[in-house]
Amino acid sequence: MTNLVYLGIAVVLSLLGSMILWARHRKPRSMEAHMQQFARELDALAPDPGWNRRGNRRRSQRAAPRRERRPG
């Protein structure tokens, strides 16, 4: 076989691989895919319910009972 045949095989294989990668990684264009992407963006922007406005972690809703101090 000549060198051009080997070169042609290499070109065909790389075009085939490029098409497969493009098909797997392209962005979906359906309406549902856009709605899911929007929902993911809203979740990313939503504040964490465990944090307050000052940036501190909130205590649990039910406070632990305090121990009474014994005089002594």
Image (cartoon, rainbow, N blue to C red):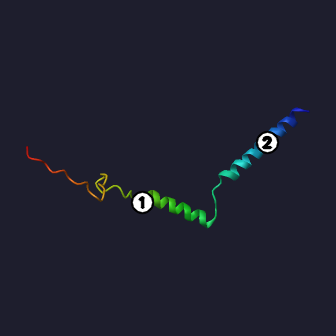
Separation of marks 1 and 2 at Cα, in angstroms = 46 Å
Type of amino acid under label 1: Ala
Residue 43 in the figure: left or right of residue 10 = left
Q: In the depicted view, which residue is nearer to us: 4 or 36? A: 36
Residue 42 in the figure: left or right of residue 2 = left
Q: Residue 57 at what x, y percent from top left? A: 31, 52
Type of amino acid under label 2: Leu
Q: Secondary structure at mark 1?
A: loop
**Viewport quadrant of the N terminus:** top right
**What's the mark number on residue 25?**
none
Q: Residue 16 at what x, y percent from top left? A: 77, 46
Q: How many marks?
A: 2
In the image, is residue 29 above or below residue 4? Answer: below
Residue 48 in the figure: left or right of residue 11 = left
The residue drawn where x is 28% and y is 58% is 62
The residue drawn where x is 38% and y is 56% is 48
Residue at the far bottom in the pictured view: 31
User: Where on the picture, by quarter, is residue 64?
Assistant: bottom left
Q: Secondary structure at mark 2?
A: helix
User: Where on the picture, by quarter, is residue 35?
Assistant: bottom right
Q: Residue 34 at what x, y percent from top left? A: 58, 63
Residue at the far right in the pictured view: 1
**Viewport quadrant of the C terminus:** top left
Residue, disc 2: 13
Of tags 1 and 2, which is closer to the observer?
1
Q: Mark 1 Cα within 10 Å, few/some/many (few <14, many 20+)? A: few
**What's the mark number on residue 46?**
1
**Precedes in sequence: disc 1 or disc 2:** 2
The residue drawn where x is 72% and y is 46% is 18
Residue 37 in the figure: left or right of residue 9 = left
The residue drawn where x is 90% and y is 33% is 2
Q: Mark 2 Cα within 10 Å, few/some/many (few <14, many 20+)? A: few
